[in-house]
Image: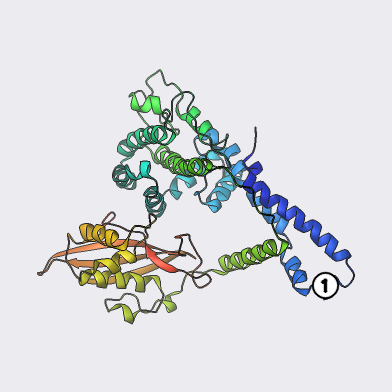
Amino acid sequence: MKKIANNPSVQGIRDSVKSLNMLKTVFNCVPFGAYIFPEWHKVFESMEGLAERVKILEVPDRFNEAFSKRGWIAYESMNLKSMVQAIEIAEEEGYPAAEEFLANTYDDNVLKFGIMRCNGQSDFRKRVRLLELAASDYLAGRYHACVPLLLALIDGLANDVSKHIGFFAEGAKLTAWDSIAAHETGLKTLAKIMGLPRKKTNEDEISIPFRNGILHGRELAFDNKVVAAKCWGTLFALRDWATALANSKIEPQAKAETKWSDIIRQISKTQKLTRALEAWRPRSESELTHIPSDGPPNFLPEGTPEQVVASFLDNWVHRRYAPMAAALVDLLNRPIGKRAGLVKQEFGKKHLSSYRIISVVDKSAAMSNVLVELQTGEKAPGELITLNLSVQFSDVSNELAVWKHDPGTWKILQNGFRGATS
């Protein structure tokens, strides 16, 4: 069986590292090499341990070998650290503990980001309303409701994207060139396991979302978090498959010859990014003495996630919908006028009279949660709403970036009132 590590994009990185190691050997044999090319010497110093770190490229294969028969597969947008940790837990504590860990990774933030990405593909975008409903059921523990819905959506999505047949049908084309999710060991394997026939009524709890048994009423104890999380994992893997399929329709062009200077520059950039990620720490209480806050945005530190949220809410108070739209993540690059109209349609239904930022939790170098309390209604007492906003730091392409290291801005992921409590 072929491995994901042999995909052209992954193999290209491995070959580059091998070539760099060869270049280093040659460089060390050149008399006065370090004197003539001092910058190269620094680059080679930064390469120490690079070959060891390249082993991270083997993680998707290791993950599939460990978990694909249990209903989990690696996919492009899956968190790499979660894969590594799941493998370690399986080795140290066993598979039940590892599966519980994996299920818990499908939390509110992961669902928000995954569903947000679904807006970028037409077949998925048509189903976002139902995905939002499935997410609400999942987060509320109503697994009996979200699992059948997700299985139906998975089947229909595979049919629409492939223009062929559904996900669970025999002969479904679920592979794509140079893909992780759509590798031979990925969705194809998953569809075979999830589509197994279940001919007898079963009252015992299951841990794999057997489509036939669940939708035909033969599996009577499918309503648990592990089964539901596997459905989300399958759906997000399908989203990555759709992207790979779209890209593979374009005939690969001959690549320009790679220059050593470009490779060295990229290694240097990667090294700086790695150091920035390793050095990241959430802000301490002494750095958040301005929270809670009900003051205007300029009372908050410039360039912080909480200031972006405060500006968004201040614009909402004054019904300035275009600046509100600019503060939200938009993967479709729609005109600001259209986005402002959508924001007005969603947020304009409530008049915000005042707001208060209750707390800020820095989740990672590119993600923070800002808890806000909103007072709505033009007349007192109105309605008091609590909303937890997820804010991401990203570059101009909406790709995650490292705050205080990369150029970028904080953008709000929330595009409505999901998760709000009165």
Looking at the image, residue 100 lies above or below residue 275: above
Going 85% across and 65% down the picture, which residue do you hit?
A: 28
Residue 156 is situated, as x and y percent measured from the top left of the image, at 36, 33
Q: Residues within 10 Å of mark 1 (few under 14, many from 20)?
A: some
- Number of marks in the image? 1
Which one is nearer the viewer's eye here, 196 or 413? Answer: 413
User: Which residue lies under the disc numbered 1?
Assistant: 34
Residue 333 is situated, as x and y percent measured from the top left of the image, at 38, 58
Residue 218 is situated, as x and y percent measured from the top left of the image, at 35, 23
Looking at the image, residue 89 lies above or below residue 24: above
Residue 41 is situated, as x and y percent measured from the top left of the image, at 78, 70
Looking at the image, residue 407 lies above or below residue 158: below
Going 41% across and 42% down the picture, which residue do you hit?
A: 232
Q: Amino acid at mark 1?
A: Ala
Going 63% across and 49% down the picture, which residue do you hit?
A: 57
Going 35% across and 66% down the picture, which residue do you hit?
A: 370
Which one is nearer the viewer's eye here, 137 or 253? Answer: 253
Which one is nearer the viewer's eye here, 288 or 259? Answer: 259
Q: How is the image coloured?
A: rainbow
